[in-house]
Image (cartoon, helix red, strand yellow):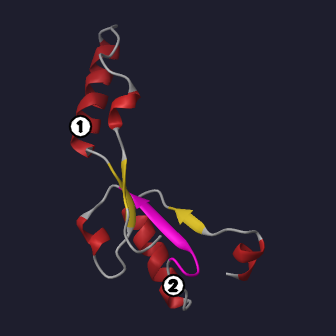
Amino acid sequence: MGQWAARSVTGICAFNDETAIAVLAGMHEHHLTAPADLAVIGADDIPTARLNIPLTTICFDLHEVVRRRTEAILASLVGSKPRTTPAWINPQVIQRSST
């Protein structure tokens, strides 16, 4: 933790909630707490993100993301443009006690 603090690192944004939960577990093993020592945020709002140390996360409709991405791939395979742009994802921050 000393090196992070010396470099003014105050938080971690993990690839997904599973990775963020692993970060929280590692912090626990080193007697560190979130958010006092390091804020932690994940992405995808899985059910376990609400347990133990409730994890702040970024929520989005994964089924809609997959549906639209599939539509874009299929459109490119037949030589046409997809109907939507990436702006429709509409992510939302779910504030919990890890930040």
90 in relation to 10, above or below: above
Q: Would residue 72 be counted in the magenta stretch?
A: no
Indicate the amino acid at tag 1. Answer: Glu
Q: Position of residue 27 (x, y in %)?
A: 52, 82
How many labels, in total? 2
88 in relation to 93, above or below: above
Residue that protrudes farthest toward the right in the picture:
6
> Magenta residues, as a range?
35-43
- The residue located at (40%, 65%) in the rendering is 56
- For the residue labelled by badge 2, is the local secondary structure a helix, a strand or a loop? loop
- Mark 2 is surrounded, within 10 Å at the Cα level, by few (under 14), some (14 to 19) or many (20 or more) other residues, namely some
Residue 37 is drawn in which quadrant? bottom right
Q: Position of residue 38 (x, y in %)?
A: 57, 75
User: Is 71 positioned to the left or the right of 79 in the image?
Assistant: left
Residue linked to disc 2: 33
Residue linked to disc 1: 64
